Image (cartoon, helix red, strand yellow):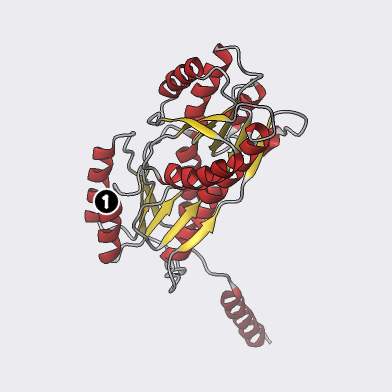
Amino acid sequence: MKRTVTTIAAALAAAATLALPATAQDNGMAGKKVIFVPITMGISLTEAWARRMREHAEVGGYSFEVRDAAFNTSIMSELLAKAIADKPDLLVVHNPTVQLLARQIRQAEAEGIPVLQINLQSNQASTGFVGASWERIGREIAEDIVKECGAGTGKSGKVAVVPGQLTAADSVIMNEAAFKVFEQGGIEVVSNQASDWEPEKARQITATVLQQHPDLCAIFGHWDVHTMGAGNAVRDAGKADDVLVYATGGGDSVTCKAIEDGVLDRVWSYDADGQGRDAGTLIDLMLQGARNPDGMMIAESPLKVIKAGDGYDANLCFKM
């Protein structure tokens, strides 16, 4: 009887072992290395991404390292070159322009290091991309501006565009999409000057534009953080009731505070917190060998439109 019970217990234990789900030790990810090279840390966008990717790394059993370029493009190229030389199992890159890192992305992929581009694309395709549809955002914001400022509204139709960098993927794609809509909707773009992602520079640009065009109807900023500088210039000029300030962004609580304070009016948020989770999921899949034989693996970010007024909801923003 004792021998029979022991045999049954051993069989049950073996069956239970067979039924266990895959763990970090047997999923092919454990012990691998991921390096993230962002434009800069210390902003909610990249901090949110890194937080969520790091959570995935902890669960998956692989290492996750951040190498911060601190808004220095020369240093960023050097950091990426060093990262490639270190032979990680995957690279995550955040492109400041469409061309800057193209050669290095191509080099990494040629050396068997898959690259996940996050939010800002390079001209060079890679294994994966997670981020916003800049064409959709540019088109939708432009359509809203036409509705508020265009032909038949009685407004001037004048708009100032404030990109971060004219050659950044978001600016290139959004401007192309928006300008097509503007041309058909009676909108005149009176300024298209880059702020280098700096709120103070965006404020100065906007203050000058308002002096030159006191009948300005709207501002289209390409990132909420620097567009807050433009919004402050509008408030300082006493034109908060006359000029609509549009922006895109990651949608953290600072964005909602800017909406509440009347610094921004309408923000198309791509939810950086959700993007970080999506990036972590793609990293997990890519480390396990997932590939799209027809091109890049793509996770497009859902959009949230955050507006001042009756429909405003602070829960549309995330908290760090």
* Displayed quadrant of residue 14: bottom right
Viewed as shown, does residue 93 lie left or right of 119? Answer: left
Viewed as shown, does residue 121 lie left or right of 44? Answer: left
Q: What residue is disc 1 on?
A: 83
Where is the N terminus found, in terms of image quarters? Answer: bottom right
Give the residue displayed 37% in from the left and 61% down from the top.
126
Give the residue displayed 41% in from the left and 26% down from the top.
198
Give the residue displayed 59% in from the left and 22% down from the top.
263
Can residue 101 be seen?
Answer: yes
From this viewpoint, which residue is outermost toward the right? Answer: 310
- The local secondary structure at tag 1 comes to helix
Disc 1 marks a residue whose amino acid type is Ala
Relative height, residue 186 to residue 101 (above, below): above
- Camera-nearest residue between 281 and 254: 254
Can residue 318 be seen?
Answer: no
x, y (%) of residue 132? 52, 49
Relative height, residue 77 to residue 28 (above, below): above
- Camera-nearest residue between 255 and 245: 245
x, y (%) of residue 73? 28, 38
Where is the C terminus found, in terms of image quarters? Answer: top right
